[in-house]
Image (cartoon, rainbow, N blue to C red):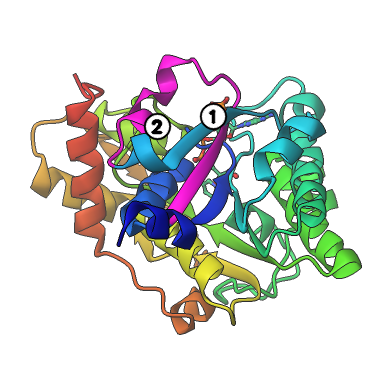
Amino acid sequence: MEAAAAAAAAKSVCVTGANGFIASQLVKLLLSRGHYVVRGTVRDPGASKNAHLEALESAGERLQLVKADLLDYDSIASAVTSCEGVFHVASPVPSGRSSNPEEEVMGPAVIGTTNVLKACNEAKVRRVVVVSSIAAVSNNPKWPKGKAFDEDSWSDEEYCRKNQDWYYVSKTLAEREAFSYAAKTGLDVVTICPSLVIGPLTQSTVNASSKILINYFKGEPETVENRLRNLVDVRDVADALLLAYEKSEASGRYICSSHTIKVSDMINILKTLYPTYPYPKNFVEVEDKTAYSSEKLQKLGWTFRPIEETLRGSVESYKAFGILN
Ligand SMILES: NC(=O)c1ccc[n+]([C@@H]2O[C@H](COP(=O)([O-])OP(=O)(O)OC[C@H]3O[C@@H](n4cnc5c(N)ncnc54)[C@H](OP(=O)(O)O)[C@@H]3O)[C@@H](O)[C@H]2O)c1
């Protein structure tokens, strides 16, 4: 295709929080497709933590990084102007407890989502894919014990507040806001609710969910609860986001989780693949039957990698970035 024809056929999409773990993988996937022009929002375009994005294949021709803060409506509105689609990925993902959750977590998540949706509605964006989380699904005391969580389950806001699970509150309120805004305006909104996301880092900084896996290589903590971990590969999450965008029949929310595995079983796989690390030594057995169904997403055409590939991909990227030294 000639350059002019290629430019005419290109579709402009915006990815919020482009330098994050999931968003970086999504930007990489979009660029690899060849027909997307990507506008990625970052808070500090000059920062070295964006360098990996500029180094992606085709970034020079088809990636533009723009400065935007979720709490600054005008910056978001200008980022989504003339975009056909928007992937709203940015949201605070704290590693520990926040001292000021309203300001640090809830505000950017909820007001940020409202700002993105309002800007998309005004810009007549065709579809917005919002990254929610199983945090908006699983804290639901009314859900039948032992039944895999599906899209009908919503976390109970009051229950999350009582437990001071602020991240859960932020994701629940943000996703509810997304659907209520869609119902009011007719904006086409689809949400994806991933479980714990691991897999290869594209960026050189370590995000909160990758830290959980990285700590196992340091043998931290030495004693761990032998819970069930519900996991998904970051590359499979990026695939799910693109699928939700491209498939016209996609609608509502989609749980995106591929493996349910006990911590001890996961560590045994890691020990087989990479025997030289210290790893946690003791496991405390706990009653945990938490599992999720991604059947709705699979029916849309989603497939996922085997867990060994995810663990290997994660570790090889940590080694490449010197994180395990
Ligand atoms: N990782 C998981 O296990 C997991 C699971 C389920 C759902 N999710 C969801 O997936 C999304 C991405 O998570 P991630 O794991 O990729 O996290 P991440 O690497 O920490 O990325 C978070 C992104 O959000 C941006 N951000 C935070 N506050 C912002 C604000 N006020 N204005 C603009 N940007 C802001 C950050 O920008 P800065 O670099 O400027 O801070 C960063 O780009 C989030 O919505 C998260 O809730 C993650």
Residue range in magenta is 36-57
Q: Nearer the viewer, residue 279 or 99?
A: 99
Q: Which mark is residue 9?
A: none
Asked whether residue 15 is drawn in magenta, I would say no
31 up-or-down from 44: above or below = below
Give percent across and percent down for residue 138: 64, 60
Q: What's under tag 2, amino acid-wise?
A: Lys
In the depicted structure, whether residue 271 falls above or below residue 318: below
**Which residue corresponds to the image point at 35% horizontal and 73% vertical from the top-left?**
303
Q: Which residue in the protein does label 1 denote?
A: 95
Q: On the rendered structure, is 66 left or right of 111?
A: left
Q: Which residue is mark 2?
A: 211
Asked if the residue at tag 2 contacts the one at tag 1, i.e. Cβ–Cβ closer than 8 Å, the answer is yes
Under circle 2, the secondary element is helix
222 vs 191, left or right, is left
Mark 1 or 2, nearer chain start = 1
Q: Residue at x 58, y 78 (%)?
A: 248
In this view of the protein, which residue sits in the foreground, 232 or 138? 232
Number of residues whose C-alpha sits closer than 10 Å to that of mark 1, classed few (under 14), some (14–19) or many (20 or more):
few
